[in-house]
Image (cartoon, helix red, strand yellow):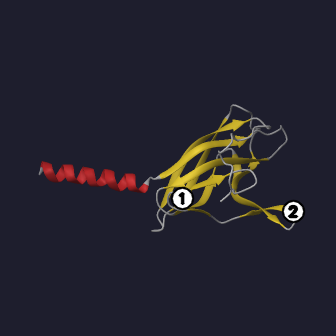
């Protein structure tokens, strides 16, 4: 009986660790001026298996939208996207000038040194969804990501 119990516990541990395989690196959000109602959130995501970022939310914003910036002719355009692919084993940068999260209808000013709670919803190929909550540090208005972090758009 003990042997079966240990096997069941090991199987459950393996199943839960197989599901939670999204890595979030170097998250940050841009500070705002007092009357500003939007900001951006940036980070690097990596999934062990194919997945998609399908939604995000934060209690400090009325909405969090996923956006993509790209050149269209000679102009940089930003548009909302329904999801962001997270190919297995590949780092996906949410960066200024690429995919990123927009914090819209902010309920308060974001000041350097603050932390913004952000929940990411990731959908796996089997349609199961995983929530990941991240405390995102707020960086000054003039902050630039260190070289190599968030540098390339996917």
* Residue 132, image x, y percentages: 53, 50
Residue at the extreme top: 113
* Residue 81, image x, y percentages: 69, 65
* Residue 23, image x, y percentages: 51, 49
Residue bearing the label numbered 2: 75
Q: Which element carries disc 1, helix, strand or loop?
A: strand
Mark 2 surroundings within 10 Å by alpha-carbon count, few (fewer than 14), some (14 through 19), many (20 or more): few
Q: Quadrant of residue 142?
A: top right
First along the sequence among labels 1 and 2? 2
Label 1 with label 2: CB-CB less than 8 Å = no
Q: Quadrant of residue 63?
A: bottom right
Q: CA distance from mark 1 to mark 2?
A: 31 Å
Viewer-closest of 77 and 13: 77
Between disc 1 and disc 2, the foreground one is: 2
Residue 49: mark = none
| Image height of 134 relative to 64, above or below | above
Mark 1 surroundings within 10 Å by alpha-carbon count, few (fewer than 14), some (14 through 19), many (20 or more): many
| Image height of 7 relative to 25, above or below | below
Q: Which element carries disc 2, helix, strand or loop?
A: strand
At 26% from the left and 51% from the top, the residue drawn is: 10
Q: Is residue 86 left or right of residue 153?
A: left
Q: How many numbered markers are drawn? A: 2
| Image height of 134 relative to 111, above or below | below
* Residue 56, image x, y percentages: 62, 54
Residue bearing the label numbered 1: 122
At 72% from the left and 59% from the top, the residue drawn is: 67
At 47% from the left and 61% from the top, the residue drawn is: 49
Q: Is residue 143 left or right of residue 118?
A: right
Viewer-closest of 125 and 65: 125
* Quadrant in which the C terminus is drawn: bottom right
């Amino acid at each position: 009986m003990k042997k079966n119990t240990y096997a069941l516990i090991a199987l459950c541990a393996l199943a839960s660790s197989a599901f939670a395989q999204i890595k979030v690196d170097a998250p940050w959000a841009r500070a705002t001026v007092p009357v500003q109602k939007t900001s951006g959130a940036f980070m690097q995501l990596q999934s062990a298996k194919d997945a998609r970022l399908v939604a995000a939310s934060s209690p400090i914003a009325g909405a969090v939208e996923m956006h993509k910036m790209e050149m269209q002719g000679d102009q940089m355009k930003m548009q909302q996207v329904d999801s962001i692919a997270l190919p297995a084993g590949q780092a996906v940068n949410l960066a200024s000038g690429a995919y990123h999260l927009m914090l819209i209808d902010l309920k308060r000013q974001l000041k350097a040194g603050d932390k913004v709670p952000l929940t990411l919803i990731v959908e796996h190929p089997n349609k199961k969804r995983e929530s990941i909550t991240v405390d995102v540090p707020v960086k000054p208005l003039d902050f630039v990501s260190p070289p190599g972090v968030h540098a390339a758009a996917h």
